Image (cartoon, rainbow, N blue to C red):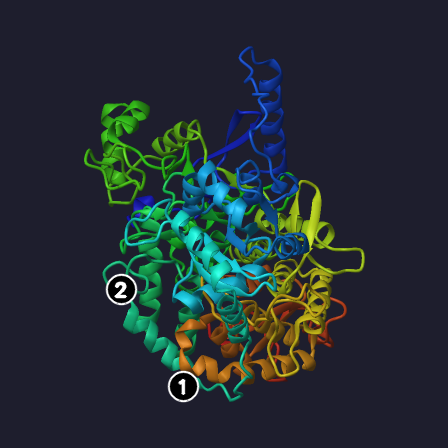
Amino acid sequence: MRRSEQSTGWSSIPQLLSVSFRGFRASVVIPPGIPSVKDVALCSALVVLLVSCSPQEKTVSKEKPRHTNRLAKEKSPYLLQHAHNPVDWHPWGDEAFEKAKKEDKPVFLSIGYSTCHWCHVMERESFESEEIAKVLNDHFVAIKVDREERPDVDQVYMAAVMRMTGQGGWPLSAFLTHDRHPFFGGTYFPPEDRWGRIGFPTLLTRIAAAWKEKRAEILADGKHVAEALAPEAAEKGELKEETLERADRAFAESFDETWGGFGGAPKFPRSVALEFLMRRHARTADEKTMWSVRFTLVKMSEGGMYDQLGGGFARYSTDEEWLVPHFEKMLYDNALLTRAYVQAWQITKDPHFERIARESIAYVMRDMLSPDGAFYSAEDADSEGIEGKFYVWNPKQVKDVLGADEGQRACDAFGVTEPGNWDPHEPGIPKGNSCLRVTGAAVKDESKRKLLEARSKRIRPLRDDKVLTEWNALMIGALACAGAAFDDPRYVEAAERAAKFVLTKLRRADGRLLRRWKDGEAAIPACLDDYAFLADALVDLHQATFKPEYAEAAVKIADDMIRLFGDKDGGFWFTADDNEKLVTRMKETYDGALPSGNSVALHALVRLAALAGREDFLKAADASFRAFASQLARQPSAFPHMLSAFDMFRGPFREVVIAGDSPQMLKLIRTSYLPNAVVARADTKGLPTTEGKKPVNGKAAVYVCENRACKLPVTTVEELRVTLGVKEQ
């Protein structure tokens, strides 16, 4: 990154806040940074005024859809996308399985999510086909599930399909017996036999025939698969430093020294792996480890996977260069990557990392923020039925916006060429479009603003506007960490608003968490991930505000998590004791695109044990590490976030308490990378960590305790730097 392109202040990308209503869009150019509540209100008022005053008001077709199925009564954007398919879809529930039993039909289960490109493809090709729908309706009972609403259902049947076929993904297609046992499955099936894949109609016909002719075999297979999904008894052991070292070596061996990241295409931004490696660097001072993190973060932010105009990251790169993304944008990816860039900035003070973190936050606050302060889930990869169309450019489009000379400079800066670098999936789409990437040439901020404004007038991808507790928790934690590190109260305020929403709107009267909020309705019992992620995020929010209510809420949620999900043999089940009983109850440990609920639960428990003085939290963590030790030892690089939690657990773990008011010492703490520490103020009531800690001789003091032993308090920045072992940069 060239020095002239770096920024240590707010995002250098101008922000365009847009709101759509009844087919109209109003936009307000706002100062760089995150939009305020007033900005949102102004933009909403403008669009309503536009609708009410426009002489060209869009007419809404009153033509009744040819088909409407049971999904029309659901809240999930994904299920509603299929509400007018000719397929007689059912939501997940007893009614569908009772019908299947009564009519003696197998169940076809289709699982996906609203921003899934290949889910859209299979819908267009098969589920909107009258002929294919007739086969489904005649011989099966069809069920649709939104994996983001019901991750418990998705988890079970994804595991079954992977066991049967060796691969998984979405759309997930599974065939079940009346007893909900899976006997066959796969992912995407084309509408006809092609590409070496069996066509969906052929498959349906064969399974329908087998259901009649080989029923006993199918029932036996289904029962066998269901039994095989049951978790094996934990082979308890003891986690050791050697496991951390082996994970470190595994990441080093798979590191791509040309483009960054791990492995080849498709390439995912494994945020949890980068966080683990930053911890290893803090532990070992190995500069090569930190170099791999820095190199990866820079390369990701220079490629097309990063939105060079609007900020924020797409889901993953289809190539090894981070150039052509799978264009959907997920809230969780942007939360996790924001945290990774904040941590990298704390270690290096590289302004490039601060800029990317701020721009990612600006994207989320501009395009994913609800009027109530919560965050929506995702934006689709497709617009106008074409994946990526909203984001790509050709030279003519750029020059039409900027003029010939400045347009050519922008094309040079963003790698926009006549041949293009983007090859669309859909046949018949013109070539010659490019994903924007950083080439090293300079481009004016004003040019970026104009291109962003022009792009905003295109037909946008669909936004999934449901609110999920788990993903909001990730964004709350990321905002709290960024707000503290960058001394930006607006981020902390946004985190508090979202936390208030989750703690009030996504809770039952008895205090139990719910998973999903949509159109004023909260529903679906929360799973382990919701509890674990929220508890961990509230620790971050407490450290950014020092408000006792966040620490109290985190402790309460952690207590509930242990009670509802804890296993006496260690670890946590994905579903609560009193949730719907599926064919098996599972424990998730793998850290993939998201860290597992068990990993985050252990992370939260270790921090809360120090912050709230809860020895029982440490005992629960210890039992879990022992339960998972053998599993982690076999393939340590699959569990980087759990190993990060273990790194904290084995210590030394610090409790940093500030007594009195010292902005300089607080700044040093918050701008330093202290992964194995909790921070509190001495005047916070109800925390054993803070008891007895006071200013020294009228001066603000910082107490640093390790392994239940406190060092002498320090009263100057220089003394604190030495005590914390922080290098001056």
Asked if residue 374 can be seen in this view, the reply is yes
Q: Residue at x 77, y 60 (%)?
A: 511
As drawn, the residue found furthest toward the bottom would be: 237
Instruction: Give left or right: position of 235 versus 121.
Output: right
Q: Image quadrant of residue 320?
A: bottom left
In the rendered view, would you say 267 is above or below 3?
Answer: below
Label drawn at residue 466: none
Q: Do the residues labelled 1 and 2 touch (CB within 8 Å)?
A: no
For the C terminus, which image quadrant? bottom left
Q: Residue at x 47, y 44 (%)?
A: 10
Q: Where is residue 400 shown, x and y percent of the image?
A: 30, 23
Task: Work out whether residue 57 or residue 434 is closer to the camera in this orientation and state it.
Answer: 57
Q: Where is residue 265 shown, x and y percent of the image?
A: 29, 58
Instruction: Give left or right: position of 152 versus 126.
Output: right
Mark 2 Cα shell of 10 Å, populated few (<14), some (14-19), many (≥20) = some
Secondary structure, mark 2, is: loop
Task: Work out whether residue 689 or residue 367 is closer to the camera in this orientation and state it.
Answer: 367
In the rendered view, would you say 3 is above or below 297?
Answer: above
Q: Where is residue 644 shown, x and y percent of the image?
A: 48, 73
The amino acid type found where label 2 is placed reads: Asp
Q: Which residue is drawn at 62% across and 77% down?
A: 713
Structural distance between the alpha carbons of marks 1 and 2:
24 Å
Q: On the image, numbered disc 1 is attached to which residue?
A: 242
Label drawn at residue 256: 2
As drawn, the residue found furthest toward the right would be: 509
The amino acid type found where label 1 is placed reads: Glu
In the rendered view, would you say 356 is above or below 62?
Answer: below
Task: Work out whether residue 8 or residue 243 is closer to the camera in this orientation and state it.
Answer: 243
Q: Which residue is drawn at 46% across and 62% down?
A: 184
